[in-house]
Image (spheres, coloured by chain):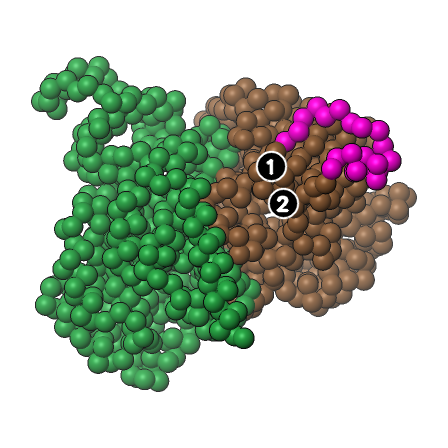
Chain colours: A brown, B green
Amino acid sequence: MNIRFFNARILTMEEGRKIFSGEVWVSGDRILYVGEGRSNDDIFQELKIPVIIWDREIDCNGNLLMPGFKDAHTHSGMTLLRSFADDLPLDQWLNQQIFPVEALLTGDEIGELTKLAVLEYLTSGITAVFDMYLTPDTIFEAFDSMGMRGVQVGGVNNFSQSVEALEDWYVRLNNKSPLQSFKLGFHAEYTCSKELLLKIAELSHKYQAPVYTHLCETKAEVEGCRDRYGMTPAAFLDSIGMFDYGGGGYHLVHMSEEDIEVLKKRKLYAISNPGSNTKLASGTAPISRYLKEGIPVALGTDGPASNNCLDMFREMFLVTGLAKLKEEDAAAVDAMEVLKMATVNGAHAMGLPDADVLARGKLADMILIDLDQPNMRPFNNISKNIVYSGSKINVKLTMIGGKILYENGVFQTAEGPAAIYERAEEIIKDKKQKISKNVL
Amino acid sequence: MNIRFFNARILTMEEGRKIFSGEVWVSGDRILYVGEGRSNDDIFQELKIPVIIWDREIDCNGNLLMPGFKDAHTHSGMTLLRSFADDLPLDQWLNQQIFPVEALLTGDEIGELTKLAVLEYLTSGITAVFDMYLTPDTIFEAFDSMGMRGVQVGGVNNFSQSVEALEDWYVRLNNKSPLQSFKLGFHAEYTCSKELLLKIAELSHKYQAPVYTHLCETKAEVEGCRDRYGMTPAAFLDSIGMFDYGGGGYHLVHMSEEDIEVLKKRKLYAISNPGSNTKLASGTAPISRYLKEGIPVALGTDGPASNNCLDMFREMFLVTGLAKLKEEDAAAVDAMEVLKMATVNGAHAMGLPDADVLARGKLADMILIDLDQPNMRPFNNISKNIVYSGSKINVKLTMIGGKILYENGVFQTAEGPAAIYERAEEIIKDKKQKISKNVL
């Protein structure tokens, strides 16, 4: 498909480039042209390409094209457990509510529940997700069939998955679809034996591949690691060679100086999840410190059982708002820095260097932000409007790999919402029945 | 107009009443019937009324009718200054950016800018606002012409408005329109001389009327009051009789034990503004404590210059999320309590006892929440879905006083968005020109 967007405001997210008016041309899954609106013949000449017959020409009416948001940490399949057990202490929530239901889920069911998450990602302008959940093969199929760009990451721990499975997924699920990839990873230090962690580090060395994990999310996790190994989590994992090829941590709330040094030394990504950390009362990550140290920060929603929505606008407001509260400084974490976290840094964190900005040759993963809404007016500063006032209501169009998957509130995915909603309701009904039987 | 909503889920917000399926009938500006869907003839008989010819019958398709949200603290006219000066320390923000522009605004301009806010309120399901700003007469006209239920409150201080003006508005702007009312109030202790405060307290006694003000918002405010009067703000104001007829405070972040005692003794409303308190780094209000003490909490967005959006979904997530963070307890402030703050308590705080719940004889101020969106699925707990996952994208219809003002993304207000947006852009352009001339 060749699609021409014209009459747009454009925020490419290239360093230092301001919003300007112009056109974006898309051919196949890539961006062919980003620039001012001129005679199209002139542009064809400049690009040294033959005249294109457009499949669609979209008048953006002055609305804003920008790179899609990258949700750099989520567990999509947990849509099932949204509002299933909230307002509970963390340990009760996990052990008594979440785990028993998860234990009953089949791979196919997780695939279906992942599709429900994809619908929500599209409404929030999310064009790629970094997903850790139980059954990578069925999740792969779900993302791929819906047209979602999915970067999966292993969630190995003492109770599920294995190093063998991790290697198998790593080998099989990379290079199988242009939309899908797979990264090495494990659930967390506190759910893995040292033996297991050593094997994962070995695998990282074998493939010279980065590793990702939940890291320093809660006080209890950090204290437990100190008790076990006499070190805080990032320092301990680094001491066994886990981050020799880089990677990143999810959450990164409770950090020692040693942990921060590890982030810097290994050039790790700090993937922050402020919505989840707020709702689960985990604490506030030291975002200003990360920025000061030059540690790249990306943003993720975490899973819908702990957030409970998949909404990058929430994460963007919170990552700066909570930093302002923490530092008692309304100037902490500038809005442009936040937009960079949600787009460029997210893409880099999850190994998608071609999905970071709007420029010739980059992936056509982009969104059209509706500025014709009262929360975007007046135009004092459009970037700040997006970060501080933006909402799902402002997502007019979501395109992934050159395909429009959501436009004006209508899903153009292979499967529509009605069937996906129905299936999710059936699955939760089934699980509730099984649990109540188990209890009786 | 007689409007019948059928095939709806209904959350009346009456104490202890669960969501059920049924119908809501509206006649004029009031609710005629809320109950299960039965033969309409049976209902006419039960109500002892003649058969109604419906102007509209709306199939809700299983979506949720509930009372509209009450934005219990805002400065609507500040839409002009959205994203005008963010990411700045509070004093620079106010003194160097906000005040100079405000000083140039005319009453008519404030009316226009208020209309822009009304559009956004409607997209967020807000059916009444408690508004403090500079020119009550033009704000009254703006709300009334747009069909918005507006409760205004005086913002008297040493620099603008006066006790005489306050009394004049109080007498004139109450009972002038069924949609509008006016409450006694002043900007804050720290912007009013003791003489001025005494006169306002006197006025409250004259009319036996409650008084509202910004209260204990920042540490600096509390320290300043201690320096001036040897008491914290609520305690000081109570000592001069300000709250003898009740009222409420906006923000209430930094509270002494004496202040909390005043809230309890005078039955004041604690009107919380978590979005603004976050973005301006003011701190986190002790919401769990208020609930424990039986102090009614309501929610407000504050003005769009400090938030920056007018979105009750943001406030609902934050009021519980920030309490969870503050208490380090994921069980703090249950979602149903939050919904009550955003509806029932807000209505009561602003003197709208007939706008609190959906019931026969109550005002037809209600909203239809779109459950046919991925962020609302599955239906594990619809109330929690609204609080933790809800967004403007879920507001399908907003009705105020029996009139549908917003439906499926389309405004049905007297003035449409295009003209209002254009006027706002013109006003900010004009102010920027004048400021740059003043500087030169």
Quarter holding the C terminus of chain A? Answer: top left
Label 1 vs label 2: CA separation? 8 Å
Residue A401 position in % (x across, y down): 73, 32
Residue A141 in sight here: no
The quadrant of the picture occupied by the N terminus of chain A is: top right
Type of amino acid at the residue the image marks with label 1? Cys
Q: Name the residue under label 1.
A: A60
Residue at left offset 21%, top offset 39%: B363
Measuring 89% from the left and 43% from the top, which residue is drawn there?
A207
Report the side of A56 relative to B301 (left or right).
right
Residue that badge 2 annotates: A9
- Secondary structure beneath dot 2 equals strand
Magenta span of residues: A39-58
Q: Which residue lies furthest to the right in this view?
A: A206
Mark 2 belongs to which amino acid? Arg
**Are circles 1 and 2 on residues that touch, CB within 8 Å?**
yes
Of all chains, the one bearing label 2 is A
- Residue A276, label in figure: none
Compare marks 1 and 2 and give the one earlier in the sequence. Answer: 2
| Left or right, A357 with reference to A280 | right
* Residue B70 vertical position relative to residue A39 in the rendered view, above or below: below
Let me know if residue A50 is in the magenta part.
Answer: yes
